[in-house]
Image (spheres, helix red, strand yellow):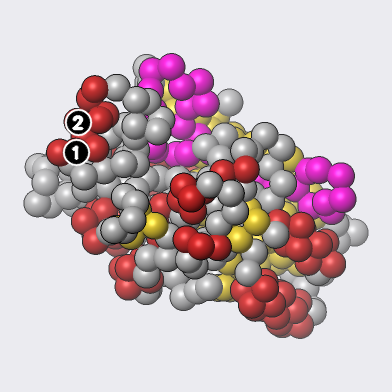
């Protein structure tokens, strides 16, 4: 049996200023003061938790504690906003030399980054990564700065991640798609839904299907091929409120079924989950939030996961999930 292992995380919320709570998440005099003085209306990240995630990625890539992983994928909300001040810090985490100062102008601490891992590190944008300043409201969707800062890692709106992950004659191919709202007017319902909704645009879905068909043509020879779609918004997530949903999500499910998608990776919900609803021929894996600053009362915690793609002699592919939760006492991600 051949196995390919992928570390999946999402919703890092890296920002210029760490440890901010959003008034929407936890309203208090302090968060309101942050809203006015620090110009943020969104929660940022916990620096210690993010460092622990980087430690885990290095340990897993080196195979120090378990069989080595083959790739890392981050399914959106890399930064707290799509403004340069936040994207610059997120870029440092992904691209700065490893084991050098993570924030060379902000701290003297020696911190790990994801740069230098000898495995692929793949990303795609989430709704926060597309936030731009608005005259009508605090933020609006449609920002394009993400594409500039991460032009070496994201060439959307649809991207086939290279290289293919291969063990013997078994292959996993990941394809990312950006279903963030292009315009605030594309949202459904209240005006503020533009901040957290996504939409399956027909032209992006068409491109996703086209790339999937190409991948299947390219890899006609391997004994087994698993095609995995990576998006930020999980389709038909059981408990997601309308303000955060993926519009036209049924069309995404329909096409994934039609073209034999093995699994779908997503973030956005801040809940670690694996689910399949009636009518789906694949499982959806939600990674939770790996490093957003949480309140003491938040029971979801900070999560990431490893997907083990097991290929059997008959060509079938099964997926075993390992969940990791940040332990506040040990300051590390532990398998749960």
Q: Is residue 283 magenta?
A: yes
Say which mark, if any, is on residue 33: 2
Q: Residue furthest right?
A: 314
Q: CA distance from mark 2 to mark 1?
A: 5 Å
Instruction: Tell whether 251 sits left or right of 11.
Output: right
> Within the image, what quadrant is residue 211 found in?
bottom right
> Within the image, what quadrant is residue 166 found in?
bottom right
229 or 200: nearer the viewer: 200
Label 1: element kind: helix
Instruction: Tell whether 196 sits left or right of 140.
Output: right
21 or 4: nearer the viewer: 21
> Within the image, what quadrant is residue 243 found in?
top right
Label 2: element kind: helix
210 or 303: nearer the viewer: 210
CB under 8 Å between discs 2 and 1 = yes
Residue 165 on image: x %, y %: 61, 65
User: Dividing the image into 4 quarters, which one contains the C terminus?
Assistant: top right
Residue 70 on image: x %, y %: 55, 57
Report the residue at 39% width, 37% height from top: 292
Neighbour tally class for label 2: few under 14, some 14-19, many 20 plus, Cα within 10 Å: few
Q: Which portion, as a residue range, is magenta?
A: 276-303
Q: What type of secondary structure mainly makes up the magenta span?
A: loop
Neighbour tally class for label 1: few under 14, some 14-19, many 20 plus, Cα within 10 Å: few
Report the residue at 46% width, 32% height from top: 302
Is residue 291 among what the camera can see? Answer: yes
Is residue 76 among what the camera can see? Answer: no
- Residue matched to label 1: 36
């Amino acid at each position: 049996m051949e196995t390919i292992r992928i570390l999946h995380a999402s919703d890092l919320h890296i920002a210029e200023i760490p440890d901010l709570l959003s008034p929407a998440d936890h309203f208090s005099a302090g968060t309101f003061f942050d809203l006015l003085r620090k110009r943020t209306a969104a929660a940022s990240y916990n620096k210690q938790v993010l460092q622990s995630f980087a430690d885990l990625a290095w340990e897993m890539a080196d195979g120090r504690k378990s069989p080595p992983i083959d790739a890392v994928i981050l399914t959106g909300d890399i930064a707290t906003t799509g403004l340069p001040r936040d994207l610059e810090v997120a870029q440092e985490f992904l691209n700065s030399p490893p084991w050098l100062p993570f924030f060379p102008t902000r701290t003297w601490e020696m911190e790990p980054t994801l740069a230098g891992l000898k495995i692929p590190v793949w990303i795609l944008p989430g709704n926060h990564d597309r936030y731009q300043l608005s005259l009508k409201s605090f933020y609006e969707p449609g920002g394009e700065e993400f594409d500039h800062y991460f032009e070496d890692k994201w060439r959307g709106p649809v991207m086939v991640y290279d290289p293919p992950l291969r063990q013997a004659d078994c292959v996993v191919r990941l394809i990312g798609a950006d279903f963030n709202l292009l315009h605030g007017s594309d949202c459904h319902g209240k005006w503020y839904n533009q901040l957290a909704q996504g939409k399956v645009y027909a032209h992006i879905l068409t491109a996703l299907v086209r790339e999937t068909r190409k991948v299947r043509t390219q890899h006609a020879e391997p004994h087994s091929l698993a095609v995995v779609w990576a998006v930020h918004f999980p389709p038909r997530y059981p408990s997601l409120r309308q303000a955060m949903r993926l519009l036209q999500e049924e069309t995404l499910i329909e096409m994934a079924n039609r073209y034999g998608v093995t699994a779908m990776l997503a973030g956005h919900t801040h809940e670690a989950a694996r689910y399949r609803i009636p009518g789906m021929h694949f499982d959806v894996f939600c990674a939770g939030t790996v490093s957003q600053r949480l309140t003491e009362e938040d029971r979801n915690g900070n999560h990431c996961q490893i997907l083990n793609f097991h290929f059997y002699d008959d060509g079938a592919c099964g997926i075993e999930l390992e969940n990791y939760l940040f332990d506040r006492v040990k300051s590390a991600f532990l398998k749960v």
